[in-house]
Image (cartoon, rainbow, N blue to C red):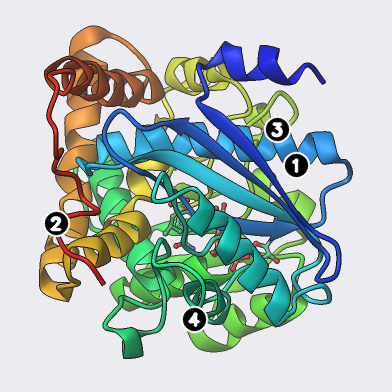
Amino acid sequence: MKIFESLGKYDYEQLVFCHDESSGLKAIIAIHDTTLGPALGGTRMWTYDSEEDAIVDALRLARGMTYKNAAAGLNLGGGKTVIIGDPKKDKNEAMFRAFGRFIQGLNGRYITAEDVGTTVEDMDLIHEETRFVTGISPAFGSSGNPSPVTAYGCYMGMKAAAEEAFGDDSLEGKTVAVQGVGHVAYHLCKYLHEEGAKLIVTDINQENMQRAVRDFDAETVDPDRIYDVDCDIFSPCALGAIINDDTIDRLSCRVIAGSANNQLKEDKHGDILYEKGIVYTPDYVINAGGVINVADELIGYNRDRAMKKVEGIYQKIQRIFEISKRDHIPSNQAADRMAEERIQSMHHSRSTFLMNERNILNMVTR
Ligand SMILES: NC(=O)C1=CN([C@@H]2O[C@H](COP(=O)(O)OP(=O)(O)OC[C@H]3O[C@@H](n4cnc5c(N)ncnc54)[C@H](O)[C@@H]3O)[C@@H](O)[C@H]2O)C=CC1
Ligand SMILES: CC(C)CC(=O)C(=O)O
């Protein structure tokens, strides 16, 4: 892999390799763009097939965070970490504390939080070494696990998409096929079940799948059959790149709305969904609830303020559909346009020299 060529492709700022032999830490922090403020994005722990796969994932996810934070109206740039390892077997205290020290070394250029494979407890360990971590225990005055709030934002975004596709935002009686019923999707299924939606779920983790059956009367299908399910809404809530050349023609839904990051394998898959008339809810807009919630910690956490902002995902998605219709472009491009315009305009207005520049990190200290 040609690292600088990869960084050049989408103008990445920094790629940091963190290594601690005794704890087994192998982490890669990718910082994409800090025009709007320090880079905030979660830490994913996953068993990658190769180091190259891990780097590619960190880069893709970091760039996604730049767009997510910009589109959500946050004064934050985009970054992400991947830790190479099995979250069930390889975690230890020293690993997360060593990682916390590497984050501290970046002196606020990067702030972390949970992602797939990491928990509030892991964030608390990182917090032993640095203040540049969010999603830590409520006992520290923080917001805790972001997943339930991400789920609420997804629910709001799904309703906005239902209104676009069906002319009414009610999900009662709608069939929703959910891929992956982990932290976010469990809470999403709860909202959907309460509203009277019919759930068809899948997961590679039997325990998670059975929990959805038990708590929400969900039907199940095998993981590789989820794309063939006859449904109104397909909700990808596992990993990325699942809308690709192999799956796109199998989908029979009218709406795609889920929490997974980087759902489209390539931008061309957004064009194909648009041509097929499938209402695609851009992933980084619908799943911004978690980051909106943890970002609020940086200015002194206020749950009501954060939840109100998360509720606004409904209007944000409506706005994206408006741009898509006005400019005759797919919704993923409409979202990109919205995010890029904000970054560009701020890039210009923030170029004036200031001795003590105000930013989200020096508004409140903790
Ligand atoms: N947790 C959060 O607040 C946020 C999460 N996201 C994204 O949402 C997605 C889900 O996140 P979490 O719920 O936190 O993760 P999680 O790890 O708790 O849940 C993911 C679930 O998907 C299942 N899964 C993995 N591969 C699968 C496959 N091929 N087929 C079926 N199921 C599969 C896993 O077994 C697990 O139950 C991820 O893409 C994450 O990056 C995005 C924004 C915030
Ligand atoms: C889990 C969030 C707090 C941040 C993040 O990494 C994301 O939104 O993907």
In the rendered image, is residue 251 in sight? no
Give the residue type that dot 4 points to. Phe
Cα distance between the residues tagged 3 and 2 = 34 Å
Q: Quadrant of residue 337?
A: top left
Residue 216 screen position, x and y as percent: 49, 81
Task: Identify the element where label 1 is drawn.
Answer: helix
Residue 232 screen position, x and y as percent: 45, 48
Q: Residue at x 46, y 62 (%)?
A: 113
Classify 180 as above or below 350.
below
Cα distance between the residues tagged 3 and 1 = 5 Å
Cα distance between the residues tagged 3 and 4 = 36 Å
Furthest residue in direction front, as rendered: 355
| Residue that mark 1 sits on | 54
Task: Identify the element where label 2 is drawn.
Answer: loop
Q: Is mark 2 within 8 Å of ligand 2?
A: no
| Residue that mark 2 sits on | 363
Q: Residues within 10 Å of mark 3 (few under 14, many from 20)?
A: some
Mark toward the viewer: 2 or 4 = 2
- Quadrant of the image for the C terminus? bottom left
Q: Residues within 10 Å of mark 2 (few under 14, many from 20)?
A: few
| Residue that mark 4 sits on | 216
Q: Residues within 10 Å of mark 4 (few under 14, many from 20)?
A: many
Upstream in sequence: badge 2 or badge 1: 1
Q: Is residue 131 left or right of residue 87?
A: left
Q: Is mark 4 within 8 Å of ligand 1?
A: no
Give the residue type that dot 2 points to. Met
Cα distance between the residues tagged 2 and 1 = 34 Å
Upstream in sequence: badge 3 or badge 4: 3
Give the residue type that dot 1 points to. Ala
Q: Are marks 3 and 4 in contact (CB under 8 Å)?
A: no
Upstream in sequence: badge 3 or badge 2: 3
- Quadrant of the image for the N terminus? top right
